[in-house]
Image (cartoon, rainbow, N blue to C red):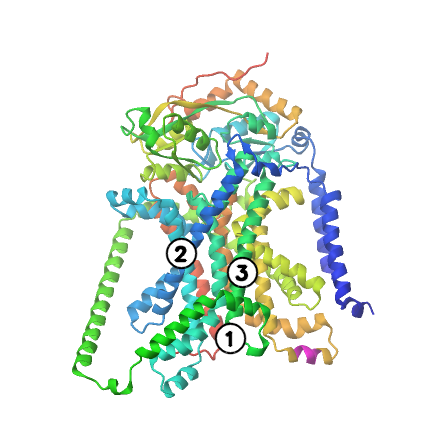
Amino acid sequence: MRVLKIAAMAALLVMAASVAFAGPTYDRVMSTKVLKAGISNQGIPFGFIDEKNDWVGFDVDMATEIAKRLGAKLEKVVVNNNTRISFVQTNPPKVDMVLSNMTHKRVRDEKIDFSITYFFDGQKFLAKKGAVKDVKDLANMKIGSMQGTTSIVNATAYLKSLGNANPKVTGYDGEVAMFEALNSGRVQAISTDSTILLGYAAKVPGKYELVGEFISDEPYGIGLPQDDSAWRDAINFTLQDMWKDGTYMTIYNKWFGPKSAYPFPMTSKIELWP
Amino acid sequence: MIKTYFEKPPVQNTILVGMVGLVIYYFAFVFEFKYDFDWAVFVTEGQYGHMGHLMLNGLNTTLTVTFYSTLIALACGTIFGLARLSKFKPVYWFATCYVEFFRNTPLMIQLFFWNFALPNAFPEEIRFKLFEMDFEFWCATIGCGIFTGAFMAEIIRAGIQSIPKGLLEASYSSGLTFTQTLRKIILPLAFREIIPPLGSEFLNNMKNTSLAMTIGVTELFWSMQEVLSLTYRTFEAIVVATLIYLILSLIIAGIMYVVNEKLKIMPRDKVTPLRKIADIIFWPFDLIGQVLEYVLWYFRKSPDKRTVSPITRLTKTSVKQLILFAKILFISGLAYSLYAIGMAIAHFNFTVIWANLPTLLFWRFPNGDETEFFMGFGGLAGSILIAIIAITGSFFIGLIIGMGRSAKNRVLRIPCTLYIELFRGVPLILVIFWFYMVVLPFVFKVYIQAFWAGTIALTFFFSAYIAETVRGGIENIPPGQVEAAKASGLTYFQTMRKIILPQALKQMLPALVGMFIAAFKDTSLLYIIGVMELLRAGYAVNNRLMVYPFEIYTTILVLYFIFSYIMSLYAKRLERRLSPERVRIDM
């Protein structure tokens, strides 16, 4: 019986200790010097596992740089399309920020806060080279997309606007499954943010091409806990500093520059406050 | 004094009500969720559509997948269960391979394999024909069916084998023919024997269909995730999905209970009300049976027809030849498929497998980041570690809950029963979600690595199953021993510790090893929350290579199989050693 009592006491202590840490994110990061970032590990080129089994990507580099500038140690936490929002939404948040090629949307902004846009993307379609002569061809094709993203909603709406009243859009579990569906011929085209499509298309050079124009704007923001302006300012200022001193472009060119595997020219400029 | 007071039912009921009240009071007034509930998301049309309809569609798909896969499982189970008893060795071997292979690899990877790797084995035209049909749906349905079929085959085989040899000898010596023995003795007895385990397989199959979401089937779990990521209502989505799964489980359990009641042998004058209801429900089946009986009576052979006429002899020899022909056909079919599999394996890109084997075994063990779990420990070794921790933990929880479940006192028994039924009624993948996204962060406000969250979820899930095993073990001990212990003045805990548990644990040992295998296989589900166990490691490798899914998933399957199979052989040996009186009957 005594063992049980001691165990119960220990459990209570652990819980009390974890509750004591709750507080504004900025203070916590500054005092513990640990920055927890939620990043996807299956989205080439934003966050993925490379040949050496290292977790790399654009988002990973951005998170590392932000942590460095805030003087904290980065702790990477795996998130996926289904968990990326809820992890900053819990109270206290499970992670301090989420970089997971996440589009800044107003509905999402009701639940969590976002930084300024740190990447500009848009949704497109990827199909076998020559399979789509005209955008109208897409209307009656089987389309694959990703579960838990708005891409699937956008794609369905787009196909409807092309004249198919009952489009077939399947939501696969993550990027790999979606691309595999295209690769095996299960779907004729896949649709999500263009950079992700580029990343996978580069795996089989020359076989696939992006078709049509952007069907939506996808400005990526860093997901942050709701109502914590000190923390949001810190992140925004860091992003702007990175842009000003050129670190941003260095990271950008590493992943999307002309010499990279998935060139994606920079078209916009991030918001800069004087 | 207090003890005798405690044994009175009204007192126990009051305490139970008090406990419920306390829990409600705590969560309603004391506990701060720091989360605003909005149940309206399920009844109103949102920006991304009607979430309630989404869930209903999911439920519909779940039911459809469950229905078809159960039929497939029953067919597979019956065919292979009988084949396991065949005296013709190739059929026996084939059935054994089927059962062992599908029981000892995780369903999740089987589904991945069917979905990603299998289509590559077909020529292009057939593949595209397949994809034009509802490929993912049928992939999941057939995959679940084949998986559950392997378990059912073992249950059916065990049911048939459980009939004592003496009964068969008695029936033959009293002049019954083989078909009569089968119909009158073997099947009714075997059926009664297999109904409870078969029922739990139906239940498992329903829960397992939740894994279909990993390959893009829009069933209930998929819908739940979709609601979760479109509306960000974590709590509401998970609660609704849990309730639906619990209700489905209750319905299946209820049906099985009624069937069980129908099969019970009870004297005509002591029929319970439930039995009467069961009788009414099963009246059509009884009617069919009676009609069959009537028909068969008229078609039976009279003794004078049993003399062998030339025509009978001719048919008999031709049947023999037909069987011989079928056997040859079977063997050549088997040989061809072995050849095909061998050729497919020979064409594997083995350099890819060799290059990634260390990753699959240990993930990035010594080179991991310091924020990762134990220097990047994972892969097969990680899966084994999770299984060891989870089973050790759940053994102790299961022991306590199992003892509570078999206690006479309601205050102990009812909460323990609820615990067991709750965990056994929902899919493991949902339990993992519960712990990772609700219980730990919202209720306990602890934030731990996915590795630990997953391990804790597995621990609590399997403790419910171990508790049932413990209960079975305790109930197997003759009650005379408890009475003797009481008479010699031992307390409850002394009786348990010194007399009941040592014997019960010895009986439970094979079941515990089986549970360990199950836990090891189910570590693959932690892939969903990003734990780098074997499946996730393989997934990461595949994510990078993209073009070798066949090689990678086959390697993972083989790794899982080797480990589980060795353990299951060990469990079988234990079982044989602990119960030497088993005799294999011949049919």
Q: Quadrant of the N terminus of chain A?
A: bottom right
Mark closest to the chain's N terminus, 3 or 2: 2
Mark closest to the chain's N terminus, 3 or 1: 3
Q: Secondary structure at mark 2?
A: helix
| Residue at image mark 3 | B253
Q: Amino acid at mark 3?
A: Ala
Which residue is at a point 70% across and 37% down the rendered structure image?
Answer: A21
The answer to whether B184 is drawn above or below residue B387 in the figure is below
Residue B583 position in % (x across, y down): 43, 79
Q: Amino acid at mark 1?
A: Leu
* Chain for numbered disc 1: B
Q: Nearer the viewer, residue A131 or B93?
A: A131
* Within-10-Å neighbours for mark 3: few <14, some 14–19, many 20+: some
* Chain for numbered disc 3: B
Q: Secondary structure at mark 3?
A: helix
Q: Amino acid at mark 2?
A: Gly
Residue B33 position in % (x across, y down): 68, 40
* Within-10-Å neighbours for mark 1: few <14, some 14–19, many 20+: few
Query: Which segment did they paint magenta?
Result: B481-485
Answer with the quarter of the image where residue B314 lies: bottom left
Residue B527 position in % (x across, y down): 49, 46
- In the rendered structure, are the residues bearing label 3 and label 1 in contact, judged by CB atoms less than 8 Å apart? no
Q: Is residue B484 magenta?
A: yes
Residue B565 position in % (x across, y down): 42, 62
| Residue at image mark 1 | B578
Q: Nearer the viewer, residue B170 or A237?
A: B170
* Chain for numbered disc 2: B
| Residue at image mark 2 | B145
